Amino acid sequence: MEFKMIQKEIQLQSRGWIPTFHDISIDVHKIVEESGIKNGTVSVVSHHTTCSVMIQECSHDFDTFDLEYLQHDLLDIMRKMIPDYTNEGDYRHPGPVHAQFGRYVNEPGNFTSMNTDGHLRSVFFGRSETLTIKDGKLDLGEFAHIYFIDWDHVRARPRQVNLTLFGTTEDVGDRKYNNGEVVNTLRKFPAEEKAYMEQYDEWKKR
C-alpha cells in the first residue's frame, strides 16, 4: 500500500480592529483533492500563537462587522470570558521585558504587544484541527466549514496556515464497525438494580 505525505501553506491577510474569521474550506478541499490521497488525514495548523483553527457550521447571515452571526455570537461569549485589551494594564502581559523584546525585533510600537486577549482566546480553542480524508474528499459532514480565526485585532497583518496531509492513494475497504450496527452507549442496569423493593407499596399508600 502506497502512502504519501504532502505539506502546503495558505497565506491570509487579517484586517485588524476586530478578530478576523477566515473561511478556508474551499482551499483545504482543493488541496485535498489535488493531493492524490484517497484515504488518510489532514492537519490544519496555525503558524501563530494568537490564532485558532475551528470546525463549525456556516451560519450564512452576515452583520455589519462582516461576521457571520454564529461567529459574532462566539466573539460575544469570548469577550465576556476574556475581555478585549483596551486599556494599558488590563492584563499582566505584556511586561516591560516583553515590550523591550518587541522593540528589539523591530515591532512598530509597544501597542503591538497589547494582544493578551488574543493569546488567551487561542488557548481555549487550540491552534489545530485534524480531519479525515475519505475516498479523496474531506469528511466534514453536511454543514461544517473550516475557519482560521485571528484573535489578534491590534493591527492588520499577514497570517499563515500550515497543512500536512498523510494517507494512502488506495482504497481501504469496508469501514463499518460492528457491521454498522448502532452502538448502545446508554447505561445498562443489572437485574439487582431493577428488582422490586417493598417501599414501592408503602409509597402507594401515601
Image (cartoon, rainbow, N blue to C red):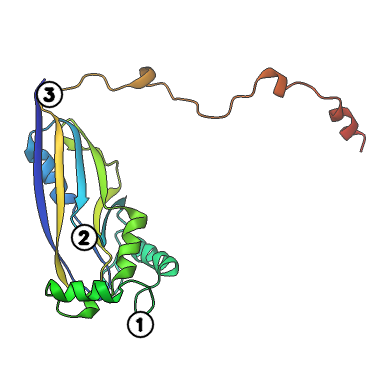
Residue 29 visible (yes or no)? yes
Query: Mark 2 near mark 1, Cβ–Cβ under 8 Å?
Result: no
Question: What's the residue type where badge 3 is placed?
Answer: Glu
Answer with mark 2 or mark 1, whichever residue precedes in sequence.
Answer: 2
Query: Mark 3 near mark 2, Cβ–Cβ under 8 Å?
Result: no
Q: Quadrant of residue 181?
A: top left
Disc 3/disc 1 C-alpha distance (Å): 56 Å
Residue 170's label in the rendered image is 3
Position of residue 3 measured from the top left corner of the image (x, y, whole percent): 10, 27
Residue 6's label in the rendered image is none
Front-most of 124 and 53? 124
Q: Dot 3: few (<14), some (14–19), or many (≥20) neighbours within 10 Å? A: some
Helix, strand or loop status at disc 1: loop
In this view, 176 is above or below 121? above
Q: Dot 1: few (<14), some (14–19), or many (≥20) neighbours within 10 Å? A: few
- Viewport quadrant of the C terminus: top right
Q: Quadrant of residue 156?
A: bottom left
Residue 49 left/right relative to 157: right
- Residue denoted by label 2: 22
Position of residue 87 measured from the top left corner of the image (x, y, whole percent): 35, 82
Residue 185 left/right relative to 150: right
In this view, 93 is above or below 180? below
Question: What's the residue type where badge 1 is placed?
Answer: Asn
Front-most of 120 and 156? 120
Position of residue 146 measured from the top left corner of the image (x, y, whole percent): 24, 51
- Residue denoted by label 1: 87
Answer with mark 3 or mark 1, whichever residue precedes in sequence.
Answer: 1
